[in-house]
Amino acid sequence: MSEELNQVDQKLKELSPEEKDRILNNFNEFKSYLNEQLSKGKRLGLSDEFLAKGAKFVADHLAKNEEPRNSEQKLLQEMWKVSDDEAKKHIALALVKMIQSE
């Protein structure tokens, strides 16, 4: 795992249960949180491809460790379950582009 993905993993582990609940209970809050993280990555000069790798890493984590809390997350989870690794990369990139376009 690259150093940057280790940092993403550490950031996920550092979230308090309350903060995690705040982010995951509402899809707009989830998108806002992702937008903040993507903006930080852009300021650090990370490419969209690398940001998509980070989004895929987070999505893998959520799929393994969290139950969906709204219909949007449920849809993403169902898409994730039936996707191979290549499709997951495309879903993650689409999510990054969606967040950046808002």
Image (tube, helix red, strand yellow):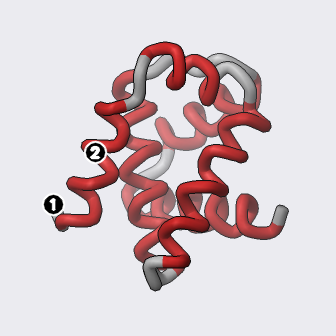
Residue 82 rendering spot, x and y as whole percentages: 50, 41
Q: Mark 1 points at which residue?
A: 1
Looking at the image, which is closer to me, 2 or 59? 2
Residue at screen point 18% across, 65% down: 3
- Which residue corresponds to mark 2? 9
Crowd class of label 1 (few under 14; some 14 to 19; many from 20; radius 10 Å): few
Which of the labelled discs sits on residue 72, or is there none? none
Is residue 12 shown above or below 86? above
Horizontal side of residue 5 vs 35, given as left or right: left
Crowding at mark 2 (Cα within 10 Å: few <14, some 14-19, many 20+)? some
**Which of the marked residues, 1 or 2, is nearer the chain's N terminus?**
1
Above/below status of 54 relative to 45: above
* Image quadrant assignment for residue 2: bottom left
State the SS at label 1. Answer: loop
Please name whichever residue, 73 or 20, is drawn nearer the observer in this view of the structure. Answer: 20
Reply above or below: 43 against 31: below
